[in-house]
Amino acid sequence: MASHGQLTRPQVMTAVEGLTTREASGILKVTGSPAGAIYLDGGRIVFARASWVPGLTARLRGLRPALGGLPDLPSGKEADDAAIAGAALRRGYLTPAGLHELVRSIVVDAFLVLTIPLAAEYPVADIRFTAMRSRWAEMFPRLGIDLVRGEALSAAERIADYGLTPTMTVTRCELREPAAVMTREQWAVACQIGPRVSARELAARRGAALKDTLECLGSLTTAGLCTPVRLPVRRATRDHPWGDRPADPGQPPPPDVLLQVLNGLRNL
């Protein structure tokens, strides 16, 4: 299966749903920005990766910064991820339940950016499925589409309320109140915010879940500890008739529009 032309993120979701219904095994590759792949075994989701989402190695090091003994295998092949997961289990860095939870978090992150239109500027160039027999080890979970889709859509709704996207930059700002109460996670994220940094960059730097980083930045924005960096709107002129468009490529659509899209996906 291959698709070309004007493609959208919901079409990726539709493709995954069709493959799970057919109980397919193979790789669904998504080309675009972001790009990624979703791995299926008998209609169940085994793993997923996306270019904007910290992978298994990064997430392991984020959980346990002292994991220097893990094999330094490059990301990109399922055998590498299986080897890294196996080493983490053998050395006691993770329990089988902990590995399942970590893989589930990575899969939901990948679905969040690959299948949900968080911003209009995240194009899809191609969707291509290659059928093959599964080679995934039994240590990886087999996740149902309903669970993964539900978690990704719920996270997208919360993120839409904050008006953030993975690529939108934020900056620290002066506290408006005498004091603020933060959780340990919020404090760790706040310490990493520089003059301009995005959730995508923060998640990669910390080896943390992208959706958790976005929600943490949203709560810090609500508390007045940081604010999105919005470039000024250009005025329309004779030479630039579309000058009223925002210059920031990470600018999301209005929250009410995004919520309508999310509700439509949920109804499907």
Image (spheres, helix red, strand yellow):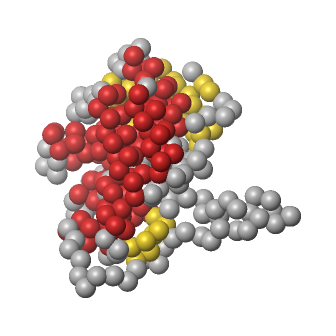
Residue 113 placement (x, y as % from top left):
46, 45
- Residue that sits furthest to the front in the current view: 256
How many numbered discs, if any? 0
Residue at image position (55%, 69%) is: 230
Q: Quadrant of the N terminus?
A: top right
- Residue that sits furthest to the right in the current view: 238
Q: Is residue 62 above or below residue 180?
A: above
Nearer to the camera, 174 or 260: 260
Evaluate whether residue 51 shows in this view: no
Residue at image position (25%, 45%) is: 102
Tell me if 265 is positioned left or right of 95 in this view.
right
Q: Is residue 245 above or below residue 110?
A: below
- Residue that sits furthest to the top in the current view: 22
Evaluate whether residue 56 shows in this view: yes
Tell me if 262 is positioned left or right of 238 in this view.
left
Residue 34 placement (x, y as % from top left):
53, 47
Residue at image position (35%, 50%) is: 158
Q: Quadrant of the C terminus?
A: top left
Q: Is residue 74 above or below residue 130?
A: below
Residue at image position (47%, 51%) is: 255
Quarter location, residue 108: top left
Tell me if 26 is positioned left or right of 244 in this view.
left
Residue 53 placement (x, y as % from top left):
41, 50
Nearer to the camera, 76 or 200: 200
Residue 201 placement (x, y as % from top left):
44, 63
